[in-house]
Amino acid sequence: MSAPFPQPDLLSTRLRLRLLVTSDAGDVQRLAGDFAVADTTLSIPHPYPDGVAESWIASLRAPEAANRITYALTERSSGALIGAMGLAVDPAHERGELGYWVGKPFWSQGYATEAARVVLTYAFGTLGLHRVHARRFARNPASGRVLEKIGMRQEGMMRQHIRRWERFEDVVLHGILREEWEQR
């Protein structure tokens, strides 16, 4: 079953956002499996076992993933995988939740911000969503800066909301409405 939403390639100045394919699995395992990357996410395992990347990529085509759009972030010039960005869409409420990870060799180069801007344009323009939100661990201020740069406002904090690797994490919620995006 294919997703009810079109998933065209999206382009920015430096990036091509495209479907993840099985041949990306080795790069996904190497980049996402870095402890520094896994440590800032809820569900990326560390160590990253063999076969998990292939299973994850295959799961993106499963019926259960019909309301999830997941892109490979790649460099336009080289095609190198940088990370992944997804949008979980709730059609009934015309909203989406943005999530992403970027491989450590690509940190602090503006890739997450650039990709997120393109995904927000797609979410509000093509999909017609009313709201997009994102959550991050409070101890990940770099992700907070990305979300602020794309116009999201910090809306609140859920104290000790998530348990990750034997510690409870504060989770910060950010959001943006279509009208706010259009005014930018």
Image (cartoon, rainbow, N blue to C red):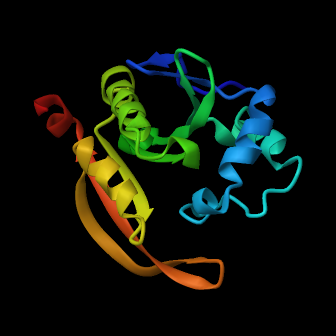
Whether residue 157 sits left or right of residue 87 in the image: it is left
Q: Residue at x 78, y 63 (%)?
A: 47
Residue 43 percent location from the top left of the image: 65, 61
Q: Residue at x 35, y 63 (%)?
A: 141
Q: Is residue 152 above or below residue 74?
A: below
Whether residue 95 sits left or right of residue 149 in the image: it is right
Nearer to me, 28 or 68: 28
Whether residue 7 sits left or right of residue 116 in the image: it is right
Residue 155 percent location from the top left of the image: 24, 63
Residue 3 percent location from the top left of the image: 62, 27
Nearer to me, 78 or 112: 78
Q: Residue at x 22, y 43 (%)?
A: 151
Q: Is residue 72 visible?
A: yes
Q: Quadrant of the N terminus?
A: top right
Residue 55 percent location from the top left of the image: 82, 43
Q: How many marks?
A: 0
Q: Is residue 162 above or below residue 112?
A: below
Q: Is residue 173 above or below residue 75?
A: below
Q: Quadrant of the C terminus?
A: top left
- Tell me which corner region of the image, top left, top right, bottom left or bottom right, holds residue 102: top right
Q: Residue placed farthest to the front in the image? A: 105
Nearer to me, 36 or 7: 36
Q: Is residue 176 above or below residue 72?
A: below
Q: Residue placed farthest to the right in the image? A: 50
Whether residue 100 sits left or right of residue 138 in the image: it is right
Q: Is residue 103 visible?
A: no
